Amino acid sequence: MSRNRELNQKMRDERREQILFTALRLFVVKGVAGTRMRDIAAEAGMSLGLAYHYFLSKEEIYTELIRIAYEKMNGAILELEKMTVSPRKKIRLAIDRMLEDLNAGEDFGWYCLLTAQAGVSLEIPEEARAVMDKERNVAFDAMERIILEGQRDGSVKHYDAKDMSLFFWTAINGLAVNKAARGEAFRMPDVSILARMFM
Amino acid sequence: MSRNRELNQKMRDERREQILFTALRLFVVKGVAGTRMRDIAAEAGMSLGLAYHYFLSKEEIYTELIRIAYEKMNGAILELEKMTVSPRKKIRLAIDRMLEDLNAGEDFGWYCLLTAQAGVSLEIPEEARAVMDKERNVAFDAMERIILEGQRDGSVKHYDAKDMSLFFWTAINGLAVNKAARGEAFRMPDVSILARMFM
DNA sequence: GTCTATATCCAGATAGAC
DNA sequence: GTCTATCTGGATATAGAC
């Protein structure tokens, strides 16, 4: 019955996905404390009991989301760093890709908001805190390295590279916040303004 | 007994201030739903009952804070707009002042975070929502006007003024988030990078 | 004005039937 | 795997003493 095993596993994974997908959005717009497990279960189309069958607690869902958030965000920039194009091109690509993902309404924007809130929050589970402490600087550092490389070959402005990386991520994050706040009314601004900070 | 009347009023005002001051910080770091009235009362140095003597509900405190937040932020930029200096100088002043306030650890940064969260949140009191809908664009519009003025006299870059205003506030907000997240480790970046977006 | 005590409600988590 | 019913703790808001 290996056929059933596989199918069951697939169903399990889908259920987990549904819960995570729903919880991510609810946590962002209602806060973690303001989101009830009932809401998550209902919007994910299952009963409260079933949600608890897949996750031991609300905190576990949250921690898992934080883990995924950093996995995605750090993964994206680290992959980009490894590409064999000029540093200047990498920065351009980074801006384009992040804003594209944001604009497409992908999970990316939601994860941005989740980590932004998590960073400010004092009330997050210990395990999530540990993930954050470990992962928080990865994307900043990667962007800093790209910028330094670009400064060495003279294609990037010679401001402090740490500061520039900070502004880069600050802008991405700020746009995510703005998009979420304005909803349909949001219009992605001209990215060359942003690029001008660097080149 | 007009002397006592005054004194009483002053005490009343101070109590309210204590509550608002405490609640602002707690709402930001724990979320509104995650903040208990007990916490607010305790940290403000009074009993739960007394806190309820000054505010009818947690929602009322929140709404009042949203009101104050926009009052302060919009007030600052509108005042700056009225000054009799060149638009270019106004932008420079805006950047300097906002970052100064942020750096000084004033309420300003906390209010930034509160409104940012409120903008994303779906769970805010109706009255607070009304204030937001009315006030949200004031600062954006004011900055847009200043930029347009600067473009007319040729001292500001000719990107779309709405976009530039968005990036300005986005950056301020992003820095507030970053400062809150990093705490003591936060170091204010070189503001000329930011200025370069505009000039 | 200020406190303690408490009524009331609601949410997290569990038990157990199907 | 999935549901309904329920236990239990804790938070909002109020009552009433000082």
Image (tube, coloured by chain):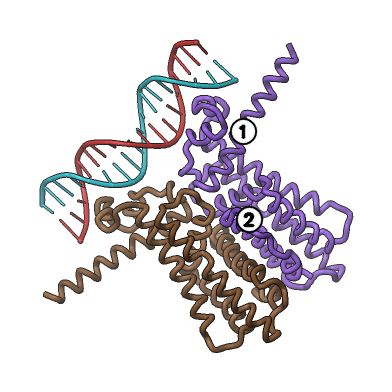
Chain colours: A brown, B purple, C cyan, D red
* Chain ID at mark 2: B
Which residue was labeled with disc 2? B176
Q: Amino acid at mark 1?
A: Gln
Residue furthest bottom in the image: A84
Quarter of the image with the N terminus of chain B is top right
Q: Amino acid at mark 2?
A: Ala
Q: Nearer the viewer, residue B7 or B146?
A: B7
Q: Dot 2: few (<14), some (14–19), or many (≥20) neighbours within 10 Å?
A: many
In the rendered image, residues at marks 1 and 2 fall on the same chain: yes
* Chain ID at mark 1: B
Q: Residue at x 68, y 86 (%)?
A: A153
Tell me where residue A70 appears, x and y as whole percent. Answer: 46, 67
Which residue was labeled with disc 1? B18
- SS at mark 2 in the image: helix
The quadrant where residue A81 appears: bottom right
Tell me where residue A51 appears, x and y as whole percent. Answer: 28, 55
Identify the mark at residue B40; answer none if there is no mark. Answer: none
